[in-house]
Image: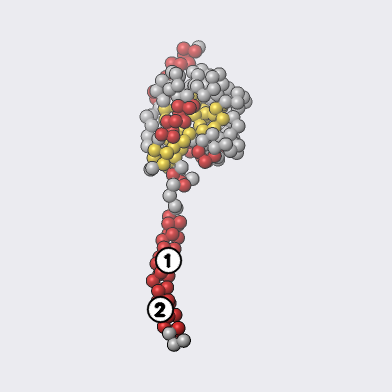
Amino acid sequence: MRTAFLIGLVIAVQALPAPAAPVLNPGNGNHYELVLVPDPFTGSNNSWATASAAAAASDHLGVNGHLATITSAAENQFLFALVSPQPGSTSPFAGAWLGGDAAQWLEGPETAQALGYLNWGGAEPNNGGLMYMNIGGLFAGIGSGQWADDSGVQGFPAAGTDPVIGFFVEYETGAAAPAPATLALIGIGLLGGLYRGRREPRRGRAVLRMRRPT
């Protein structure tokens, strides 16, 4: 049973595409990518700490990444859509790390914030562990796109129980630069400042001429 599961999981991993360039989420302006890790169950190849460090070392548009945090259903669906082609209901259970645990977010702007939006599957969270998204088929009541927290040696994937094969990276590009409307307002403000700067010396000279007779 375990051998058949592992063979199916290897086939599923090989069927998934290589990581593409980070994809823009128009909902919040941030970019995301799914990184699949070769040989994820050996040593610390794909431990949560290793994934966190790899995400932080990643760069897109001059912004460093972090393990993805999810604050809405729309954002959750966007991340799951990065699994392309999406595994069908017969695909083996598989996961990708997220930036949180059973109680709070641990990465990005949401660090140390309690979970707001929730998408746990089945009886999850049930181990007080680190969070990952199921990117495979239904397993123990956990559907595709739903979350689970890991068990066993927490932070380390385990084939058959917590088969985490990669991680999601989020780049906070939505906050990296002013929106076009903001840039327009800044430009208007600068022009106004230049105009006032040119007019003020004239008013100063006029005041001096008015004071000479006294």
Q: Position of residue 28 (x, y in %)?
A: 48, 45
The residue at which mark 2 appears reads as 205
Q: Amino acid at mark 2?
A: Arg
Q: Nearer the viewer, residue 149 or 198?
A: 198
Can you say whether 119 is above or below 173 in the image? above
Residue 179's tag is none
Q: Sort mark 2 into few (<14), some (14-19) or many (20+) by Cα contacts within 10 Å.
A: few
Can you say whether 43 is above or below 200 in the image? above
Can you say whether 138 is above or below 211 in the image? above
At horizontal 46% and vertical 46% (from top left) the residue drawn is 174
Residue lying farthest front? 214
At horizontal 42% and vertical 66% (from top left) the residue drawn is 193
Mark with earlier residue (2, 1): 1
The residue at which mark 1 appears reads as 193
Res 117 seen here: no
Q: Position of residue 188 (x, y in %)?
A: 43, 63
Q: What is the quadrant of residue 126 in the picture?
A: top right
- For marks 2 and 1, give the one nearer the viewer: 2
Q: Amino acid at mark 1?
A: Gly
Q: Nearer the viewer, residue 102 or 159?
A: 102
Q: Nearer the viewer, residue 5 or 130?
A: 130
Label 2: which secondary element: helix
Q: Position of residue 120 (x, y in %)?
A: 58, 30
At horizontal 49% and vertical 29% (from top left) the residue drawn is 97
- Distance CA(mark 2)–CA(mark 1): 19 Å
Q: Sort mark 1 into few (<14), some (14-19) or many (20+) by Cα contacts within 10 Å.
A: few
Label 1: which secondary element: helix
